[in-house]
Each structure stands twice: as structure tokens, then as C-alpha cells.
Image: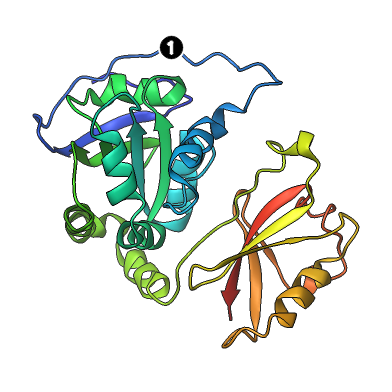
Amino acid sequence: MTSLPRNLMSFIGIGRRRNQNANFPLQPLETPQPQNSIATPEEWIFLDKFEQQYGTKHPFFYACRFIEAMKLAKQDQKFVFMYLHSQEHPFANVFCKETLCSELVTQFLDVNFVCWGALADRGEGLQMVASLRPSSFPCCAVISPAPSDGIIVLQQLEGPLSPAELVEILQTTLEEQGLAFGSAKAKRDEKIRADRRLREEQDAAYFKALQIDKILIRFPNGERREHSFLCTDKIQSIFSYIDSLGLCGIENYRLISNFPRRVYGVDQMRMTIKDVGLYPKASLFLEPL
């Protein structure tokens, strides 16, 4: 079995597939060429186009290279949920609107997986298509980190699925493959069921030209609020704004950004928003303590 290029990592095992045979050869692929510096960063292409068409209520897709998503999954002891989007396929719109963006699927994925998406006709998405060789779209896969920078495809899903069907298959995969992380998974499951994990949508580089100093705050109940701050404002200003909302049950908490993951609490109160990298635009998740 051959390996994928180093920027994607190598497959060391293949799991079950939906609507196709289980085993397939993996071919070496060309490394994608760097994009023009003035163009949209490659890591943001999928998320940018997805939100333009389907809005912002969707699973938390990490805007990063696939290898970075795998590192996050390994760090958090989770599986990666990968979605390959083919805009030309007739099932794509229905699947995205009615299944992938449904509240049931969004909550389930945010709690249990590190989500990563790509366009099937470009960049790393095109490489994944060449490796997985789906016969139909939409195409999703559950991927596990493995030793020596390898990955294992635990489940590959193809074609339209309802929210209930997708969650049922993913839940079964978690139950059958959960021992991959040993006892640590049990501890993780106990923690992630207590709250819904959301991380930062750090897009400062993408919106740099816009010079927008706004911060989006996401609450455990799914509510979102956006507020403007000066780049010279202290982190204390964000906490003061949240406290002024008088939200029920929100007393002791901390703020968490996504990628890279950073925690903001008492020790960061005197630092400015610009100093900690939250300018010109960023997303924070409020985590109750």
C-alpha cells in the first residue's frame, strides 16, 4: 500500500465504506502549489464558499490544512469527520441544507469530532477524492489518528443521508472504534457530554484588509453575539461586556479561541485585544467554569 504525500500524511489502514468495496489502493499525489498571496488563503476556500451558500449555522469546520486537523484530533483524542463537497452533484444542496446544517447533526459533530471540509475539485480535497475514490457525493469519512503520523479511515459514507441516519452511523462508529483511544476516551466522553465544545474561528489573516475590529462571542446554548472593540481595549473589556448582558447562569467562565487554541481568563485581563491576536476579527467561545 503506497503513501499519500507528506503534507497529507499517509494512510496505514482502511475501514468500512458505504456503497463501495472496503479496500482501495492509494496513489501518490502532487503537492498543491502555493496560492497567490492576495487571493483567499487555501485553508479558507471551503469554509468561505460553504457559508456563502448555506449560512453560518453548520458544524465547526476547522479552517486549516488536513494535517493540522489531524494533530488537533490526536491532541483532543477525537476522530476527524471529513466532508468533501462537490458543488456540481445533485445531492449536495439537499444534504448540506437538510442534513449537515441541521441542529441534530451540528451538535453531535461539534461534541464528538474535529470537523474538516474541502472542495472536491481543488487542493487537498482533490487529493482526498483521488485517494478515497468515492463513486458518489456527498462523501464523508471518519478518520482516526494513528502512530507514526499515519491515519486510518474508519468509515466512508457516500450519497444522501437524513440527519437521523448520519448520526446513527456516526454513533455506531464511535461505539465500535472507541477503544482506539483506550481509557482516555472514557474520560473525554464524560467531559464533552457536559458541555458543547466550540473553538475559535480565527480569521484575522483573512479579514486583514477589511480592518474590522469585531469579536464574535459564542455561548454554550448556541447563541452568538458580535460586538465591536478597539484593538487597544483590554481583555477585561470583553468580560465586562459579557457581564453587562446579565445572562442567566453565566457567572464564572473563561473565553477560548480556536486555532490556535488559547484560553483567556484572569491572567490575560490586562493584555490588549491586538496583543493576544484577536484583532482585526476573531471568534471566542464562552466556557462556564
Q: Residue at the spot x=86%, y=54% of the render?
A: 231
Q: Is residue 166 rendered to the left or right of residue 129?
A: left
Image coords of residue 84 (percent x, y): 34, 33
Answer yes or no: is residue 143 visible.
no
Q: Residue at the spot x=10%, y=30% of the render?
A: 20
Q: Nearer the viewer, residue 279 or 276?
A: 279
Image coords of residue 177 (percent x, y): 21, 54
Q: Nearer the viewer, residue 118 or 209?
A: 209
Answer yes or no: is residue 109 visible.
yes
Image coords of residue 61 (percent x, y): 46, 46
The quarter in which the C terminus is drawn is bottom right
- The residue indicated by pointer 1 is 30
Say which quarter of the image contains residue 203: top right
Q: Residue furthest right?
A: 232
Q: Nearer the viewer, residue 246 or 11?
A: 246
The quarter in which the N terminus is drawn is top left
Q: Residue at the spot x=55%, y=32% of the render?
A: 43
Q: Is residue 137 rendered to the left or right of residue 34?
A: left
Q: Is residue 153 rendered to the left or right of residue 237?
A: left
| Amino acid bearing label 1 | Glu
Residue 74 in the image: above or below residue 11: below
